């Protein structure tokens, strides 16, 4: 028995429909006959679109016709292009009151001395420079190999957060400042109970200078070493193992206690997006964000190049014109930044995004912004800056997932939700990452990696119901339930601070 392929028109103003199932050539959908095969997740024109006329999805412009497009044509990069056009920012026009949730929700977290709550309890080895990366990994490997962590059940593990910079940079420049903020953000993230910082000794990023800047001193949960002063690699590894061994009883003394959901700081990520992401996983996660914000919690939307073209929808929700203008200024900075490096904002989406049905950055951004739900935008912060406002906050980061997530965790995120349509392989330490598949095919293909399937939205599950399901999962993960990426061991290589500027 033949079945008509499913398709959906997302807004009454749209001149395309999205193919939920592949549409064969000659098949009639939405009153038009497909002139070519339309792959699943891709777009079919349902009305003629003249050359240079706008193509609309979600009721918004996602591009312009490179040539005349007939009703029934496949609409993709071969016949779509971008050019600049003005956007109506309407600052704060859509701000609305955020009422408290009817029923307070809770999770079991680690209460820190500064009043914040962690969802995990790690010992972290931070590195000042790439030159100390191997020694830091050796320390953690020795701790894990020894089995000593088995005696400390309240500790989730020891992690080496290594990176590729720390020298060859201006000690008074932006690159140094970004690295300093990122390191401090990880050292003070509520999911970290103890820190060992390892350096070489002669690098640009000096540990004593870092400690002086933040007014931190060595303590039973913050220790430092340099390879040159300690006497080489072997002695540093031995000293590092001893330092961590000394702090384990203190870190293990932390216990989970009941905490209000308002103490959750949720990082929002999407990677390997496809044509489904913008109306299944992303808006469903947005519903969960609305539930979290109603509880008094915080969500961090990021990836500035991937809200490019959708920023006007966020400025309308900015609580003040100043907040909205800060977002617009960040967009303008990225336009200048990419132009300086002979790139363009439409270099994103990636080839994989395009195979999944996304054609332009505008289309990708409109879907990506849906992760932020419908709540007010309360603040805009720079990369790795501490997030102190409650509600929806935007952090300026690149679109590259590991770099973006690193900035969010440095900002204080204690839990992360990651949507994917193509099937990203990602996990984060010390912050657990909940992976949401945008379609059932990817969920079934990558069951070992995906925590939740949002593809059932295509089968009739409502966004509201899926949002509730996501929120419930977030509370369970915050209380200690392991995610798929944690079970696989992801997170040791996903610490990637934003490296900006010249390497000297």
Image (cartoon, grey):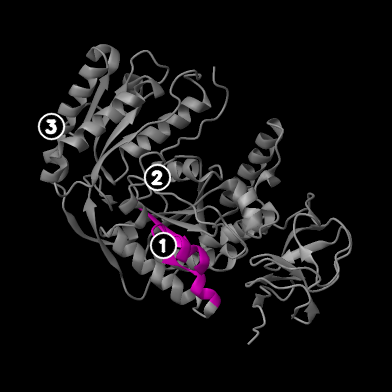
Q: Is residue 376 above or below residue 186?
A: below
Kindly identify which residue carries mark 1: 447
* Res. 52 image quadrant: bottom right
Label 3–label 2 contact, CB within 8 A: no
Q: Position of residue 283 (x, y in %)?
A: 53, 66
Kindly identify which residue carries mark 3: 246
Cα separation, mark 3 vs mark 1, equals: 39 Å
Q: Residue at x 31, y 70 (%)?
A: 104
Q: Is residue 254 above or below residue 240?
A: below
Cα separation, mark 2 vs mark 1, equals: 26 Å
Q: Secondary structure at mark 2?
A: helix
Counting residues from the N terminus, which is met first, the one under dot 3 or under dot 2?
Answer: 3
Front label number (2 vs 1) = 1
In the image shown, does 310 or 14 lie closer to the viewer?
A: 14
Cα separation, mark 3 vs mark 2, equals: 26 Å
Q: Secondary structure at mark 3?
A: helix
Q: Residue at x 54, y 68 (%)?
A: 280
Magenta range is 432-458
Counting residues from the N terminus, which is met first, the one under dot 3 or under dot 1?
Answer: 3
Q: Residue at x 33, y 17 (%)?
A: 200
Counting residues from the N terminus, which is met first, the one under dot 2 or under dot 1?
Answer: 2
Q: Is residue 122 visible?
A: no
Looking at this view, name the residue that lies furthest to the front. Answer: 1
Q: Quadrant of the C terminus?
A: top right
Q: Quadrant of the N terminus?
A: bottom right
Kindly identify which residue carries mark 2: 409
């Amino acid at each position: 028995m033949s079945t008509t392929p499913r398709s959906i028109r997302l807004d009454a103003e749209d001149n395309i429909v999205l193919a939920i199932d592949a549409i064969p050539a000659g098949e009639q959908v939405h009153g038009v006959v497909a002139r070519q095969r339309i792959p699943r997740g891709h777009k079919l024109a349902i009305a003629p679109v003249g050359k240079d006329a706008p193509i609309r999805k979600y009721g918004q412009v996602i591009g312009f016709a490179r040539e005349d497009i007939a009703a029934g044509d496949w609409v993709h990069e071969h016949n779509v292009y971008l050019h600049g056009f003005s956007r109506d920012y309407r600052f704060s026009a859509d701000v609305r009151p955020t009422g408290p949730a009817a029923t307070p929700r809770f999770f079991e977290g680690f209460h820190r001395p500064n009043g914040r709550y962690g969802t995990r309890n790690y010992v972290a080895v931070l590195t000042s420079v790439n030159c100390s990366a191997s020694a830091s990994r050796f320390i953690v490997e020795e701790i894990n190999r020894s089995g000593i962590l088995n005696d400390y059940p309240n500790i989730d593990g020891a992690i080496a957060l290594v990176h590729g910079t720390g020298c060859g940079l201006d000690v008074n420049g932006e690159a140094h400042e970004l690295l300093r903020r990122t390191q401090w953000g990880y050292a003070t993230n509520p999911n970290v109970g103890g820190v060992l910082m390892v350096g070489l000794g002669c690098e640009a990023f000096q540990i004593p200078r870092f400690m002086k800047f933040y007014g931190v001193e060595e303590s039973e949960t913050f220790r430092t070493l340099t390879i040159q002063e300690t006497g080489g690699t072997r002695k540093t590894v031995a000293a590092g193992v001893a330092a961590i061994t000394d702090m384990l009883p203190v870190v293990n003394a932390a216990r989970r206690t009941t905490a209000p959901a308002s103490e959750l700081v949720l990082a929002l990520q999407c990677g390997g997006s496809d044509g489904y992401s913008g109306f299944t996983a992303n808006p469903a996660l947005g519903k969960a964000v609305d539930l979290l914000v109603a509880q008094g919690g915080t969500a961090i939307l990021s990836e500035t190049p991937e809200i490019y073209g959708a920023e006007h929808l966020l400025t309308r929700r900015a609580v003040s014109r100043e907040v909205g203008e800060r977002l617009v200024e960040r967009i303008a900075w990225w336009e200048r930044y990419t132009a300086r490096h002979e790139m363009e904002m439409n270099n994103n989406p990636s080839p994989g995004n395009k195979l999944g049905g996304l054609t332009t950055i505008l289309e990708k951004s409109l879907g990506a912004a849906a992760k932020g739900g419908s709540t007010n935008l309360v603040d805009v912060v720079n990369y790795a800056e501490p997030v102190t406002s409650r509600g929806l906050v935007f952090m300026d980061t690149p679109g590259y997932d590991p770099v973006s997530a690193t900035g969010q965790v440095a900002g204080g995120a204690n839990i992360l939700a990651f949507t994917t349509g193509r099937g990203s392989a990602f996990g984060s330490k010390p912050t657990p990452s909940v992976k949401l598949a945008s379609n059932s095919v990817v969920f079934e293909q990558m069951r070992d990696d995906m925590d939740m399937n949002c593809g059932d939205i295509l089968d009739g599950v409502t966004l509201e119901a899926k949002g509730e399901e996501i929120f419930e999962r977030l509370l369970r993960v915050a209380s200690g339930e392991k995610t798929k990426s944690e079970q696989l061991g992801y997170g040791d290589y996903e610490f990637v601070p934003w490296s900006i500027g010249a390497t000297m």
